[in-house]
Amino acid sequence: MNRQTSIPALRHADAKERLVVIGNGMAGCRAVEEILALEPDRWAITIFGAEPRVNYNRIMLSPVLAGEKSFDEIVINSAEWYSDNGITLVSGDPVVHIDRAAQQVVSRAGRIESYDRLLIATGSDPFVIPVPGKDLPGVVTFRDLDDVETMLAAAEASSKAVVIGGGLLGLEAAHGLSLRGMTVTVVHLMPTLMERQLDEAAGYLLKSELEARGMTILTGADTAEIVEIDGHVGGVRLKDGTEIPADLVVMAVGIRPNGALAKAGGLEVERGIIVDDDMVTSDPAILAVGECVQHRGACYGLVAPIWEMCRALAAGLAAQPKGYSGSVTSTKLKVSGVDLFSAGDFSGGEGCEDIVMRDAARGIYKRVVVRDDKVIGVVLYGDTQDGNWYFDLLRQQQDVSDIREALIFGQAFAAGGALADPNAAVAALSDDAEICGCNGVSKGKVVACINGGAASLDAVRAGCKASASCGSCTDLVERLLALTLGDAVEESAKTICGCTSFGHDDVRRAIVERGFRSIPEVMQELHWSTPDGCSKCRPALNYYLLCAWPGEYVDDQKSRFVNERLHANIQKDGTYSVVPRMWGGITNPRELRAIADVVERYDARMVKVTGGQRLDIFGIRKEDLPAVWADLNAAGMVSGHAYGKSLRTVKTCVGSEWCRFGTQDSTGLGVKLEQMSWGSWMPHKFKMAVSGCPRNCAEATIKDFGVVCVDSGYELHIGGNGGIKVRATDLLTRVATEEEALEHCAAFVQLYREDAWYLERTAPWLERKGLAWIKAQLYDDPGAVKALASRFLYSQQFMQDDPWAQRAAGDRADLHSHVGRITAGPPPGGARLAMEPAE
Amino acid sequence: MSADWVSVCGVDAIEPGMAGTVPVDGADEIAIFHTSGGAFYALVNKCPHKGGPLSQGIVHGDSVSCPLHNWRISLLSGQALGEDKGCTPTIPLKIEAGQVWLDRAAILARAGA
């Protein structure tokens, strides 16, 4: 409650007014400097500081930790500055109480100081996540010199550190500790490092760089507790059960404005201390500045806005108000050798356009976001030379329509004017100019290749290798094609999608040969033209990586179609259908009862026998799926993968056990085939069947892989399809035993998995490659079947983990619940809305 | 234009690149999208084509591909992109104090109250 309306007048003419500053940090001292610059003689100043030392540059603590600077080098205001300006410094004795009625502050030691104006600059506190063990010796934050000294002492005595938090501060701490010889693991809750400043692509580059320096970076990692060993930190345990040994744990998950003292004094405080544009709080005699304030709804944790606040504060105090109107901020990571710059808003928005440039060879990613012909955001990695130029364009809201074409190439290029037409620039290159750095191909060679008959990008790649490796010169080669041939340029083979100039085969080969391990890595190295791909390339890349690195690659749920993300089939009304696996089409009373119970318990509107010999339960809501699965699991059933680009069913007839015509145990083989191959992800859905005799009741000759049993053994058929375009299978081979049938099946499936394009069924794949090619792959080399089959079985050991059981046990509960709910409130006063927390 | 915001969830409730759903009594469910670039958007959770739940689609850039027939919908405008024609209503949204807020009036208008 603020009843004070005027400031008491001076007590007598020649006495100075008393300014008391709470906080001897960067904001408090900078504000005092600004005040002294405007009115050198007006104030008698007293500064209270909690730390027992003079003011130092807190943002330079990282270099101190890293051993790149000493404490003396980061002191801003030495003891002389205080005495020269007649400032009384009370250090190591923080203010504990503000008495606004008496206009006095009281320190912890009991010192009472009266003020005419009070300036609060209490900064912020590190946020400590409330996990068990947070108070153990060896757990520190990264906020002041004491923290740094604790860390340095730990680095000398011990070897392993965990940094919780992969933001700016956390990474700088990790870097420093790593340079001091510690083995460092960074645990970050979000999937992307520094997610507030970086997009996924830049986050990936940063992660790779830090890993290359020997740090371990765990993203999407949630800390469960800090483990104690002998009364000291022993490690960190994550919610997924992983335990990381550590002698030192640094909490760097964020900061919170420190408004406690102000709040206790009765000032208006929300997240921070509320201030107006002149940095005045709800009490006109009290000002506040820095990380402790909340201005127009925003709190700042960076230094540039604080300098702007200090200027506005001093101007307002001197009755020449300038007003602070908020800041656009930019970030640079202080990790030596890592060039990273981000500013403004790069999260997209109405009418935003992304301009992306990637140069894999030099490890560069640049993204400039433009709206209404103005730069509104920029992320630079690897080459931050133009950061300030972009930041200026951004802050000045300069119209960039004239330089838009060349904007991404930076200031030198954009200012070049004449070179702003990329075609003219390419035409102007000399014949010796290198076009393709990877393969050392000059412009002259490319043009000669084109004049020699190469009329498409693919033909140039095949003819002279230009753009055949990393692809970063694709644009140049295409321009040369256009300049040389005009309209006669031929379209190249289909690319995966509009995000890339590469086709499926190129991408698959690159993943394996160059060892790409993640979607952002593929996009960076192969020069994707969009920040995060599209609904065509993302699922394809996810599959290719999964296939190339079994047991290692972590499936990206964001890149999965809904059915594969929710492990059920979406229906036109938004509900799902659920198909439990029935091995070889065989079921029993227990399974049927469980299915019947589920149908009744969850009001499923229909149960249908599928063409693949199992039961489909329709009309389940996404929220009920985990419970449905738990019930089905309890009866011994697992996911039927009826929703996936994966093994669907193995259809069988009853075979020799019952049928008078049966030649072999077709149901038995069907069950074995299904048990071997269930759970495997494929380029597309994959169906199998086993018929017990050539009457073929299981319709094996329209399946992706079909077995027809005969007296002498088993005929193996491939590439059939019963869909839009019916295709009967081709006979692959005949084998004598079940074991051989299983091994050939595994080999064929693996060949399909490793070679086909994503979303290509076996039928079109076989027609594209030819039966002869497939037979050659399997049988030319006598060891090929065994090698392919063993790769398949190796991969299967990671795949045969029932996804339903994982979800039923609570995995990814977020995918099955609402984030909130809006209910109509009681009618008085018209319709109202009330909030309920999510279930 | 009076600000009348209702907070629905924390910003951490939705992983970047994904969407969350908010059922509304007496009106269409709302989908809240969190792009991998970090932006948040709210749309009625219905594709203009056949009413598919957009929240379940793949989010890329500032658009989402409907899970039913792969229509691409702009998260900014709700407009179908490419050859397709149609529009899904958008709900004004803001991020403040670590929370996602929706415009109460826009929700009420949808509820036909």
Image (spheres, coloured by chain):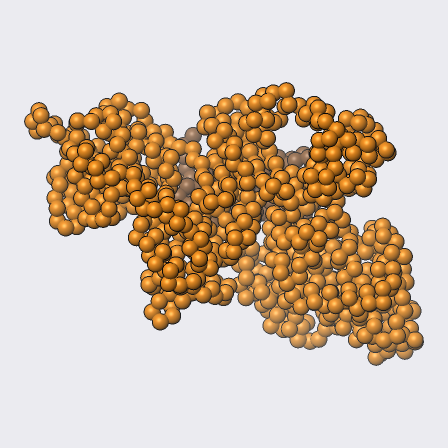
Coordinates of residue A268 in the picture (x, y in percent): 26, 40
Q: Is residue A572 above or below residue A249?
A: above
Q: Residue at x 28, y 35 (%)?
A: A30
Residue that appears at 56% across and 55% down: A815
Figure check: A693 above or below A348: below
Q: Nearer the viewer, residue B107 or A304?
A: A304
Quadrant for residue B63, please give it: top right
Q: Is residue A239 left or right of residue A723?
A: left
Coordinates of residue A771 in the picture (x, y in percent):
89, 57
Q: Give chain A's shade.
A: orange
Residue in the picture at 42% in, 45% down:
B98
Task: Determine whether, in the image, residue A215 is placed left or right of residue A101.
Answer: right
Q: How many marks?
A: 0
Q: Residue A149, position in %: x, y?
A: 32, 54
Q: Nearer the viewer, residue A501 or A215?
A: A215
Most extreme residue toward the front is: A432
In front of the other: A355 or A608: A355
Q: Is A126 positioned to the left or the right of A736 in the image?
A: left
Residue B27 seen in render: no
Q: Is residue A345 left or right of residue A504?
A: left
Look at the image and tell me in which quarter the N terminus of chain A lies: top left
Is residue A442 among what the camera can see? yes
Chain given the colour brown: B
Question: Residue at image x 53%, y 47%?
Answer: A206
Q: Quadrant of residue A12?
A: top left
Q: Quadrant of residue B73?
A: top right
Q: Position of residue A427 (x, y in %)?
A: 72, 25
* Residue at the bottom extreme of this rendering: A657
